[in-house]
Image (cartoon, helix red, strand yellow):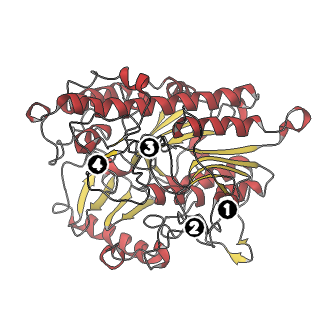
């Protein structure tokens, strides 16, 4: 899983960023064109791990308690994680990377990975942070510190994943199955990458974000990922035209570092997949790659305050915090994000970003590779699907049964559906509704129709078959459809524990 990566940020989905390992994975598997996450880090991880909607899992926002059952910031006791499910079936369960579905407290471990089914864990409890010195770093159940002059969290996540695979039984015992969950924090801010990697991209973005959006859209059309009839969404109103902007050297550098982060992640994925091949397990290993939300327009100002923001580097230099054009990002003593305009480009051809439930916030790549389970290779899959579908899919693929009880407590029924029929050439029910709510942003999709609204905004209705970029609101022309879908959304929200955002939002 990538972090804060947009729909068009990898080669198989139209990007100019070199991602040869994901390219190979896509060529050997299948790419979903209409797969969805939940618009934010913690909720997507909760839904992936449990197969239910985030509010049902207790993680309707982030990993802090907002005072309502659906917003506790902790995985609920009534949920079963993928690791618990597969561990009960004899799988060795391994995780490397970002957890982010429990409190970041280093003293309360009841919902840490090892307490939720993983045999081994290396990673962080909290969300994005310093790549050279990540906060809340844990090995199994022990807090640790980053070590070594060449430490970078993206590389460390890949290294530990490979090490965990190295530690699997060999010889006759090598038939024991494994589950590996790799959760990168790349390319989430801050913009931290190795200088040599950044240098290969510097100068590559001087044509600007408007040209980049057009180029990516055309590649997506050429790949068959999007319809040529879908117009490119208008540049976000908070983003200036490239030719009207200042600081082009700094802007080019921001996107160059972001590209380096994506490329570095792809390199690590390649090493992990090479280890799977070396184990002789490639043919019968199901591999899935996706992102937790769309590209992020979050800004970092010089006066930003966050407990996980460091004040100095490991060697004692002060960290220059904030998106300051006079400071080129990338090194350990900087702390920046890439901003609205580049995030808009990451989410090409869609509009909006992480946090929102318009397509730019929730549309993600999904690459699925399983040589013995998917006969066709390199094809596109048009079936709409959701991250809640991954646990049921893995359960069916592995022949495991979702339990009725966990630790003596009745479990919540699954919301997702298995994608195995899709892998086998069939299709799921085309009109099943899919739902979203995050920070008061809300949406429902059923078949070709999507009803969506920003927080405290009016419902908008789009026919995604002809307008997936959400440029022509049909709510006034099709009031009956809008009313029916809004009624379904209200019933769902009441059932899963959605609370009006103004009643729970942090003050």
The residue that label 2 is drawn on is 75
Alpha carbon separation for disc pair 4 and 2: 27 Å
Q: Looking at the image, is mark 4 or mark 3 earlier in the sequence? A: 4
Going from N to C along the chain, the mark reached first, 1 or 4, is 1
Name the N-terminal-most of marks 2 and 3. 2
Tell me the mark number nearer the camera, choosing from 2 and 3.
3
Give the residue drawn at x 48%, y 56%. Answer: 44
Disc number for residue 343: none
- Kindly report which numbered mark, 4 or 3, lies closer to the viewer in this rendering: 3
In primary-sequence order, the first of circles 4 and 2 is 2
Residue at 21% x, 28% y is 249
* Label 2, label 3: how far apart the Cα atoms are: 37 Å
Residue 369 makes an appearance in the image: no
The residue carrying pointer 2 sits among few (fewer than 14), some (14 to 19) or many (20 or more) residues within 10 Å by Cα, namely many
Q: Do callouts 1 and 2 mark residues in contact (Cβ within 8 Å)?
A: yes
Marks 4 & 3, CB-CB < 8 Å contact? no
Check whether the beta carbons of the residues at disc 1 and disc 4 lie within 8 A of each other.
Answer: no
Instruction: Name the one closer to the observer, 88 or 131.
Output: 131
Look at the image and tell me in which quarter the C terminus lies. Answer: bottom left
Single out the residue that lies furthest toward the front. Answer: 316
Q: Badge 1 is on which residue?
A: 116
Percent position (x, y) of residue 293?
41, 50
User: Which secondary structure, mark 2?
Assistant: loop
Report helix, strand or loop for mark 4.
loop
Residue, disc 3 = 316
Percent x, y for residue 201?
Answer: 34, 23
Question: Contact, CB < 8 Å: mark 3 with mark 1?
Answer: no
Q: Identify whether 41 is placed above or below 73.
A: above
User: Measured along the vertical axis of the image, is residue 357 above or below residue 420?
Assistant: below
* Label 4 Cα crowd, 10 Å radius (few <14 / some 14-19 / many 20+): many
Compare marks 3 and 1 and give the one earlier in the sequence: 1
């Amino acid at each position: 899983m990538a972090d804060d990566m947009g729909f068009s940020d990898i080669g198989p989905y139209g990007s100019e960023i070199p991602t040869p390992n994901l390219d190979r994975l896509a060529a050997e598997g299948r790419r979903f064109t209409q797969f969805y996450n939940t618009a934010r880090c913690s909720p997507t991880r909760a839904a992936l791990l449990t197969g239910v909607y985030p509010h049902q899992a207790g993680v309707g926002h982030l990993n802090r308690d907002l005072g309502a059952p659906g917003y506790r910031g902790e995985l609920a006791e009534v949920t079963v994680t993928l690791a618990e499910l597969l561990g009960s079936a004899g799988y060795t369960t391994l995780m490397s990377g970002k957890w982010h579905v429990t409190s970041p407290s280093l003293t309360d471990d009841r919902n840490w990975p090892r307490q939720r089914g993983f045999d081994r864990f290396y990673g962080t409890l909290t969300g994005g942070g310093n790549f050279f010195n990540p906060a809340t770093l844990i090995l199994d159940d022990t807090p640790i510190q980053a070590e070594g002059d060449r430490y970078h969290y993206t590389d460390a996540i890949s290294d530990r994943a490979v090490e965990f695979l190295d530690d699997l039984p060999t010889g006759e015992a090598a038939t024991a199955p494994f589950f590996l969950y790799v959760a990168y924090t790349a390319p989430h801010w801050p913009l931290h990458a190795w200088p040599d990697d950044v240098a290969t991209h510097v100068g590559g973005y001087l044509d600007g974000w408007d040209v980049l959006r057009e180029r990516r859209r055309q590649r997506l059309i050429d790949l068959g990922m999007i319809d040529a009839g879908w117009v490119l969404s208008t540049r976000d109103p908070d983003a200036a035209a490239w030719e009207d902007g200042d600081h082009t050297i700094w802007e080019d550098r921001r996107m160059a570092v972001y590209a380096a982060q994506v490329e570095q992640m792809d390199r690590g994925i390649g090493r992990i997949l090479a280890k799977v091949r070396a184990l002789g397990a490639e043919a019968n290993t199901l591999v899935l790659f996706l992102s937790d939300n769309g590209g992020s327009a979050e800004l970092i100002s010089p006066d930003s305050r966050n407990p996980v923001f460091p004040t100095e580097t490991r060697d004692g230099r002060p960290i220059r915090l904030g998106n300051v054009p006079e400071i080129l990002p990338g090194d350990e003593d900087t702390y920046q994000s890439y901003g609205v305009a580049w995030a808009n480009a990451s989410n090409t051809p869609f509009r909006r970003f992480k946090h929102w439930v318009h397509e730019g916030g929730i549309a993600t790549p999904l690459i699925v590779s399983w040589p013995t389970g998917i006969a066709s290779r390199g094809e596109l899959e048009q079936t709409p699907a959701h991250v809640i579908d991954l646990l049921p899919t893995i359960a069916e693929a592995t022949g495991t049964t979702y339990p009725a009880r966990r630790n003596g407590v009745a479990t919540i029924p699954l919301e997702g559906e298995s994608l195995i029929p899709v892998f086998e050439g069939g299709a799921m029910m085309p009109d099943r509704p899919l739902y979203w709510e995050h920070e008061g942003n809300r949406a429902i999709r059923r078949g070709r129709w999507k009803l969506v609204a920003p927080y405290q905004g009016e419902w908008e209705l789009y026919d995604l078959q002809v307008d997936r970029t959400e440029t022509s609101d049909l709510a006034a022309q099709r009031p009956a459809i809008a009313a029916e879908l809004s009624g379904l959304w209200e019933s769902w929200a009441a059932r899963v524990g959605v609370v009006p955002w103004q009643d729970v939002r942090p003050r």
